[in-house]
Amino acid sequence: MEKILRIDMSAEGGPRMTETPLGEYAGMGGRALTSSLVAREVPPLCHPLGAENKLVIAPGLLSGTTSAMSGRLSVGCKSPLTGGIKEANSGGQASQVLARLGYAAVVLEGKPATDDLYKVIINKDGARIEVDNSLKMLPNYDLVEEMKKQYGESIACISIGTAGEMKMSAASIACTDMELRPTRHAGRGGVGAVMGAKRVKVIVLDDTGKKMRPPKDPEKFKDANKRFVEGLRKHPVTGQALPAYGTNVLTNILSEAGGYPTYNFKEGRYVDAHKISGETQAETETARGGQATHGCHRGCVIRCSGVYNDKDGHFLTKQPEYETVWAHGGNCGICDLDAIAMLDFLDDNFGLDTIEMGVTLGVAMDAGILPFGDAEGAIRLIKEVGQGTPLGRILGNGAAVTGKVFGVERVPVVKGQALPAYDPRAVKGIGVTYATSTMGADHTAGYAVATNILKVGGDVDPLKPEGQIELSRNLQIATAAVDSTGMCLFIAFALLDQPDTFQALLDLLNSFHGLNLTGDDVTALGKTILKTERDFNARAGFTSQHDRLPWFFKNELLAPHNATFDISDEDLDQVFNW
Amino acid sequence: MEKILRIDMSAEGGPRMTETPLGEYAGMGGRALTSSLVAREVPPLCHPLGAENKLVIAPGLLSGTTSAMSGRLSVGCKSPLTGGIKEANSGGQASQVLARLGYAAVVLEGKPATDDLYKVIINKDGARIEVDNSLKMLPNYDLVEEMKKQYGESIACISIGTAGEMKMSAASIACTDMELRPTRHAGRGGVGAVMGAKRVKVIVLDDTGKKMRPPKDPEKFKDANKRFVEGLRKHPVTGQALPAYGTNVLTNILSEAGGYPTYNFKEGRYVDAHKISGETQAETETARGGQATHGCHRGCVIRCSGVYNDKDGHFLTKQPEYETVWAHGGNCGICDLDAIAMLDFLDDNFGLDTIEMGVTLGVAMDAGILPFGDAEGAIRLIKEVGQGTPLGRILGNGAAVTGKVFGVERVPVVKGQALPAYDPRAVKGIGVTYATSTMGADHTAGYAVATNILKVGGDVDPLKPEGQIELSRNLQIATAAVDSTGMCLFIAFALLDQPDTFQALLDLLNSFHGLNLTGDDVTALGKTILKTERDFNARAGFTSQHDRLPWFFKNELLAPHNATFDISDEDLDQVFNW
């Protein structure tokens, strides 16, 4: 991770690759690196699909090491969905492999003059880029099969499906998992559209012949990792709930809590929640010979993923995440796990953000395009997105565009990005994060659900405004830092409750890099990242007026608690006033 | 004009009408009234299609009098297209009639709970509102025919077509002309969508039995009007060019000047300009038994409109304006006047802004939906808009949405609103207006073309940055004031060059209202209006970053002058620093 690979797609005579030292980005990884580079090098008012935008793909500070949980990849750019800065985050194998290949980042710059489509191959011998127009409009699964044929089974792929090629604002970037399936996605904010605008279909990584990244102090590193893993195994969320049922363990919990947005955010409890819960999902997976527990990358000890087979026992998709099940499920009044799994597969295959697409379907249902609960209709519509029909193009550009095109008032977005699976009226801490995050509505930017609902890191009543600003602020700061390490965000449950585990993370960073970071340094890093991102957004035209939830959350009561989002604008404006 | 009619569409048991005195809005007309009311009463962050938005329809201070040129109507709201404040302005008969009926404004508030469609009837006996679902999805021409059947030939109509009912962001509000045709439109910013969201299809006005509004000093008023008319007849633009060829006289002039945006703003001169010029248009109209000179409302002495018949001599549409001919013509590479006239008719009939639609077609052509120059394809697409097919819905929401949906980078909009018929690289003064206007890109907000190209009000070189800020500033201030009088903006040519004519306007206002306004007062009024509008926009989240042209105008050279828009951001930020 001592160099950056830059690919200038605008260069005369075809793309030009250069490898540069880290320079001003030395010591940065993941989100710290992507956001710093975007903020410094991308003009905030440029068109997100234009030559001036840059797509930055960066492993974290601990990616490529033997540390557990270090396989997250950050993807940054100016977002076509929000118009602001974006860091989207993915699991899978790519981060570890790219880090072991020695790259702190791959940066796609410029824009080719022709319509040719490119593939990038990076292995121990270096990097190269080639035209391959035979890949045009391949969905992700077919694309990866083709790459396996061409480059063998020891690869990891970072790719876009048809949605990215069509530059849709809901397009994701896929990373392959341990089984070489394109199931893990940097989903949010349309990062796939930016890769599509650069005309790069796939980055094929092969770290054959490369070794694990060596720590400065191997003994201390090994010891820290042991304590870190023990901490994760000890905590009830990361040691029990997530491994057993995956993230979808939250369906019953949120519906019970009255914070499960149902029928496009009209109600807070879903009568059919049990039919699509993590418990039912795990049972179904096991009964069909799939897997209820599975890791998305090597080195994962939480293993919150799984394998979802169809009724005949054939692989259909990876275990759909809670937010995916919610978006296509309760949010659309759909309680059929098989239909939801099919939608998850289609989203992955076309390369679409599952949250954005599910919320978009809910808005389309409110527009009268199809009735709530119409699972077959939902599948048909997502197929239209993959094909790029006019209706598919509308939906593939997300909830805000769909609402605008169909004249719908009830559109749950902040900064143009769809709200995830927690109603801000009944889980007010996450509402503060949705409103104020630099990313648009994003639960992962400051997961106040942990403390509001799961009672991790304290207990802040989800229905009262008190304490939510501070809660969201602290989580947003911590998250920005964690997103820079390459660590899975789910380690935060143990970090918040167990000081020993937090210390183990510090020890991992310090022993690997020869540093002496304290908790205060981590907080300072998080603040610096947020400040950098907010500065970019301000230069892109964002103000405090954009740190607001849609109007209807203030006015419409959410059953069963009959709650509104009653945190004042003045309080929201204090989130970054630390 | 001593009262405001408010119609609360949300009221329990059906819409409730109240007539209130002007109160805090006393002394205001037109844009001053619409912008003040919107800024005071509409929450800046509300959804434009929601119950909290208000649609304000206001005649000007001199509308309904015997003064020449006083038939302009202002329509205000929070815009669904820009998200900011909006005043769209229309000719036709409605303003005079509404003023004589005694209303300073009609305000549509709230939003009905059901899907019923309403009509409002206002005559000497007062106002009433009725459900009439038989009007659903009638285009404007059919609707007006139906209203004539129901209410006779002495009416004027303010209506929406199918686009407004579908709440499209390019939807206009139509006003009937002297021949009771829905040819004059408050076009810009999607005001028709707001009327559609209120579920009001048409406002039928009948001033039978009502008299001209009486001036305080009839003799002085008569004298002032005489001098005013003489001034208009004396000026070469309002006395000769506009009557002879209409606004389309500009086609040859702008193409010659290299500021005629061609092929979606790729070139500044159109090789086929002569085929669609005002001269050719007037000749065609005359040859087919149409009219090359015609007024859009009683009291017009400029008479820049006309009647365009088809090849068989039957009425096809009113004389398409320069901006309409450009948008559907050179901007799309279409040089067929009959096709352009058909597009003008379709836009009027469905209720669409011709500028927004033409620019949208240009973007669609850049997206590869149809080739440049495909007149039949353009007609087919506009028909799809009127029908509300998925593709039609995309296009009907304007250029910005169309660009986003199809992943197009070259989208000529500011604040989401399409640029009109003057390239800002070759007519830099109008570029300053596009960038900084409170309305989004709008040539009428500060028509620097007058001084840059027509050499009215001085001579500022269109290709140099010098002097453009001050030019646009002064014109934006003056325009805001003129838009409050009910006067047609074309009086400005004579006002700028002839101090006597400006004095005649002041005398008209003073003798009618018993005032002692000076030129300074008019300037102060204009500044107050702009300040009010900018304050609303700031509270809606607009910053100086939104006072910018799209990125490509800074980078791409425009032939034949190879010009870019080279006015600095710092200078743009000085426009409202007076």
Image (tube, coloured by chain):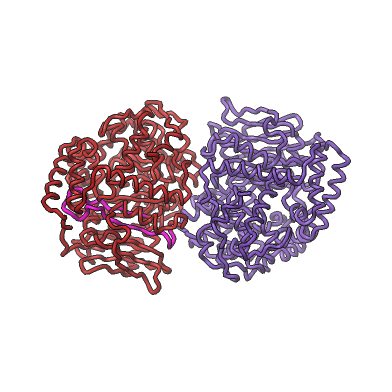
Chain colours: A red, B purple
Find residue A209 and report its horizontal and vertical position in percent.
15, 64
Q: Image height check: is B138 above or below B320? A: above
Find residue A329 and report its horizontal and vertical position in percent.
33, 39
- Quarter holding the C terminus of chain A is top left
Q: Is residue A174 left or right of residue B255?
A: left
Q: Does residue A26 appear anywhere in the picture?
A: yes
In depth, the one of B558 and A162 nearer the eye is B558
Q: Image height check: is A295 above or below B283? A: above
Identify the residue at image location x=59%, y=54%.
B434
Magenta-colored stretch includes residue A66: yes
Identify the residue at image location x=62%, y=66%.
B463
- Quarter holding the N terminus of chain A is bottom left
The residue segment tinted magenta is A49-76
Magenta-colored stretch includes residue A331: no
Instruction: Tell which residue pokes out farthest to the front in this image.
Output: A516
Find residue A428 and report its horizontal and vertical position in percent.
37, 32
Q: In this view, does B338 lie to the left or right of A124?
A: right
- Name which quarter of the figure residue A278 lies in: top left
User: Is the stretch drawn in magenta largely helix, strand or loop?
Assistant: loop
